[in-house]
Image (spheres, grey):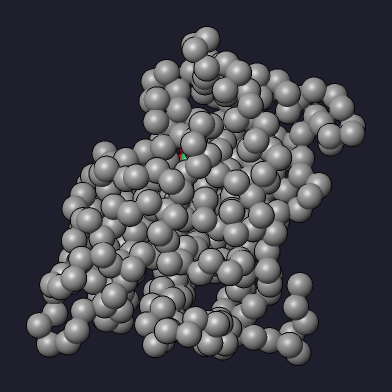
Amino acid sequence: MVHRSQITTLTQFIIQRQSEYPHAKGAMTRLLNDIATAAKIVNREINAAGLVDILGTVGKENIQGETQKKLDVFANDMFITALKGGGECCAIASEENEKVISFSNEFSELGKYVVAMDPLDGSSNIEANVSIGTIFSIYRRVTEAGGGRQEDLLQPGIHLAAAGYIIYGSSTMLVYTTGKGVNGFTLDPSVGIFCLSHPDMKFPTHANIYSINEGNYIFFPEGVKKYIKYCQENDSETFRPYTSRYIGSLVADFHRNLIKGGIFLYPGTTKNPDGKLRLLYECNPIAYIAEQAGGKASTGFKRILEIEPKTLHQRAPFFVGPKHMVQKVEAFMMESQGNE
Ligand code: P6P
């Protein structure tokens, strides 16, 4: 933790880091600040949600067929408005929108970046006052002119320029990477400033948490079933039996595992072979952060960041956490391949 007297704000930190990128002209700095601004507004609404009529549903479904919460729509609108107004982003892929939102502005040069985002992940937990989050991926555009297009977003995670999440919890934090480590900033709500609180975040070597929805056990692949039993064996040398922790909100589960040391698993099942989590705006950004924090992220057979996306909302089986834990579940998956 950082002492209050040594406060580095997010803006100061991003600007300091900008100097490490010789060709940087400040666009990424401005883009990340645009995201932080929208996050503060969303945070205010979430904190007030229990008091005003912003809980509940808008009576519509999003393109995922999931009932849209008022806060889902509010968060989506806030991030789109901030990114469009900031001028550094030329297109957005959002969990809440079926197609790419493209910005074409004849008055000024268009932004060089595109953003894939889940504006409010885990929103089904809002009524239960469980921590929820925003997840974002930032790519450089690959098309030359005009508004951003789908091909600017359908890039593998290895091409990410930045990725991060905001967790709206007991405190609100913004955690991000631009490829040179992971840093966490805690919002001081009294002044509305994100302050560096978790510099250079890494998975702890002592890791003993596993996070999975065991209610789906009978639908899991053989390799996952074997891994769950491995987690439950009694072996003090490898800190087993592990502790089971699962809250059903990806950002909250991943953030806890990053801080305390643990693996998160959302496997494919016999019902949904590609699992539930979306590659572009859930798996890839979290995988990039995990790798930058010394961890690993896999489908059980393949590095998440090397998947070539074919569609905006495609899903992927997702195992993410400390390297040795992900390698262990991969070993069970390889060993059991073909036994299904
Ligand atoms: P399940 C929330 O709806 C979410 O997309 C992720 O935040 C979370 O990890 C997952 O779904 C939980 O899914 O099937 O365990 O309820």
Is residue 227 visible to the viewer in this orientation of the structure?
yes
**Residue drawn at the location 27% of the way across and 43% of the way down:** 310
Pick whichever, 167 or 165, lies toward us.
165
Report the side of 78 relative to 321 (left or right).
Answer: left
- In the rendered image, residue 116, in percent from the top left (x then y), is placed at 34, 59
**Residue drawn at the location 76% of the way across and 89% of the way down:** 5
Pick whichever, 182 or 125, lies toward us.
182
Question: Relative to 321, is 231 above or below?
Answer: above
Q: Which quarter of the picture shows residue 243?
A: top right
**Residue drawn at the location 84% of the way across and 34% of the way down:** 238
Question: Relative to 182, is 222 above or below?
Answer: above
Report the side of 96 relative to 42 (left or right).
Answer: left
Q: Which quarter of the picture shows residue 328?
A: top right
Report the side of 221 relative to 78 (left or right).
Answer: right
- In the rendered image, residue 15, in percent from the top left (x then y), is placed at 52, 87
- Residue furthest top in the image: 339
